[in-house]
Image (cartoon, grey):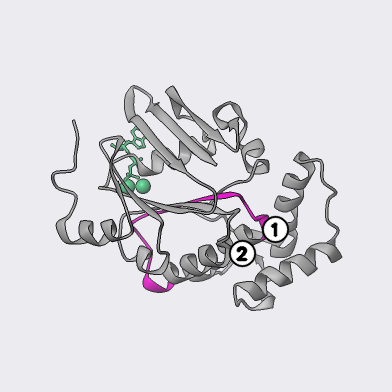
Amino acid sequence: MLEIKNLHARIGDAEILKGVTLTIPDGEIHAIMGPNGAGKSTLSYVLSGREGYEVTKGEVIFNGENILEMEPEDRAAAGLFLAFQYPVELPGVGNANFLRTSLNAIRRKRGEEELDAVAFLKLARAAVRQLAMKEDFLKRNVNVGFSGGEKKRNEMLQMAILKPHLAILDETDSGLDIDALKIVAEGVNALRDEKFSALVITHYQRLLDHIVPDVVHVLAGGKIVRSGPASLALELEASGYAGLEVA
Ligand code: ADP
Ligand code: MG
Ligand code: MG
């Protein structure tokens, strides 16, 4: 499903990714761990097509297509979901409308019929139930007055509604209390099936207590330096990243 081959990327003059190679088959959850500054967020930005990141070598094939040549909206239409780390607050914009707009943008790109408010609400309510959320969530303004946990929940709701083939979740080291970790884990676990894959990027092992990954990769110095089963995360928790850095 996702094949990253010898990916090199730079920000300005600095080469950050120095040959990342990684394959995520259908239905698998892979985790990337690694020290601060390793290039984890850079990898998620390159995959999502954020401006300012220049790919100098390598390729990323997603469901048979080279996504590096695609605009971010086309990547989303192809089934890629990138969780936003800093959710915007949109006063005056109802959450249901916001979520419907993002789903319909994808449906339009795919040549599928757009959903009207009634059809969307049916689908959104099912997602709300799947995530054991309160329905009034859909009526509130986007992220306005949401707690950190509620913003996370809303992000997971968006993911459940968009039903991506691959979700990339970059969980930064800051602001992830145990409740937020559980919300992310519930969101990912609710979508687990043979057509859904996820790349979960995290600095801390404890997220992986709740989302048990099929494979754990260690990114250090811009490369994957180790891959192994879920137990690798525990091993790293005990031993740290020292000795894994590469020149
Ligand atoms: P991680 O997410 O693993 O902590 P990042 O991908 O955020 O690492 O950063 C990797 C490296 O790229 C770091 O050395 C960081 O200082 C550098 N970096 C990140 N963003 C920029 C930027 N906008 N300009 C220059 N260097 C950057
Ligand atoms: Mg960092
Ligand atoms: Mg980061």
Q: Callout 1 environment at 10 Å: few (<14), some (14 to 19), or many (20+)?
A: many
Q: At label 2, which amino acid type do we have? A: Leu
Instruction: Name the residue that disc number 2 marks.
Output: 157
30 over 151 or under it: above or below: above
Label tally? 2
| Picture layout, residue 142 above or below residue 48 | below
> Which residue: 61% across, 64% down?
157
Residue interval drawn in magenta: 161-179
Q: Quadrant of residue 70?
A: top right
- Mark whose residue sits in front, 2 or 1: 2
Q: For mark 1, give the secondary structure.
A: helix
Question: Is residue 147 among what the camera can see?
Answer: no
> Answer yes or no: do the residues labelled 2 and 1 have beta carbons within 8 Å?
yes
The image shows residue 2, relative to residue 82, as above or below, that is above
Q: Tell me the kind of residue under disc 1.
A: Leu
Q: Nearer the viewer, residue 142 or 220?
A: 220
**Residue denoted by label 1:** 99
> Picture coordinates of residue 202 (x, y %)?
36, 54
Q: Residue at x 66, y 36 (%)?
A: 74
Residue depicted at x 54% and y 49%: 26
